[in-house]
Amino acid sequence: ASAIKNLARIGSPHKSTMMRKAPVFALSRAACRHFSATPRASAIKNLVVIGGGQMGNGITQISAAAGINVNMVDVSEELLSKSIANLDKSIMKTFKKKIEKGEMNQVAAESQKDEIMSRIKSFTSAEKASETADLVIEAVPENLALKQKIFSAIDKVAPASCIFATNTSSLPIAEIGATISRKDRFGGLHFFNPVTMMKLLEVVKGPETSQATFDAMMAYGKTIGKATVKCVDTPGFIVNRLLVPYLFEAIRLVERGDATKEDVDTGMKFGASHPMGPFELADMVGLDTCKSILDGWSAKHPDVELFKPSPMLNKLVAEGKLGRKSGEGFYKY
């Protein structure tokens, strides 16, 4: 994921984009307040995705493919241009098998791709992008201060009915939303990488998330074709709470010299029917991401043995060996 800095500043939308104007209704002030403050499950038509990295791109793609208008935010036109190019390629890739099977021709694929891309606009200002949003999803690196800064900035300009959601995999929902006024309209939407392929979406209800907000987030998940599971604000939610300790137990096994990484991966693939071993999986997730998650848990729960840092992993991350995305992690690619 690209680093997101200074999103609190006022910027301008991508030169080739125009903001859609919201329809005006003749309603009483009381009716307007009720209408705007209550999240509605069917109301997610305009989405903002903050962060144009791997996760943000995936969320943008599946949402636009589901018919939702998406404003994608990153810190520079250069990064946005790169994200748009990646989206264009990724969308065509989803049609590749259909073309090969004769279920779709190239012209039809290009037409559908163009239709999806037409729903995606790019912005360098999170505030400007959020002015007409029904839902904002933050997908930036796991940095609490950065996430709080982003949500505090858009809290001042987003519509009262707008729901805020974080894609965090490790930070407490309550802490991320501590600085905003709409705590009842704040929760977690935890996607899995790669977003376009992984079916699961963890929908996280924070301590102050209203039932209406939670229902709207669940409905959004179903709209984009995800299998949704209900989670509470606990470290790692469901999947990572089980998965991350498993990955680190595998690393510790090798650190102690009890097995090789190759044998551990082979054992879990052929002994437990896992599609890939823990070292292969860690490389796919990103070793920096694995380290960030465990570091956060360890800081919060220093006495929990399962959350202790790994010297082997820390060394690889310090050397820039982050897994598949850098060309080398536990394995070379």
Image: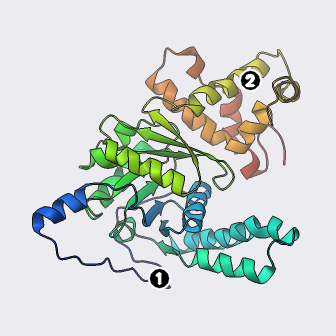
**Residue under pointer 2:** 250
Residue drawn at 52 percent across, 32 percent down: 236
| Relative horizontal placement of residue 96, taking residue 161 as reference (left or right) | right
Residue drawn at 61 percent across, 72 percent down: 84
Tag 2 or tag 1, which sits nearer the N-term?
Answer: 1
Point out the frontmost of discs 1 and 2: 1
Q: How many marks?
A: 2
Q: Is residue 115 visible?
A: yes
> In the rendered view, would you say 263 is above or below 174?
above
Residue drawn at 79 percent across, 74 percent down: 104
> In the rendered view, would you say 14 is above or below 154?
below
**Residue under pointer 1:** 17
Secondary structure of the residue carrying numbered label 2: helix
Q: Nearer the viewer, residue 250 or 162?
A: 162
Q: Whole-percent x and y of residue 30?
A: 11, 62
Location of residue 276 (image quadrant): top right
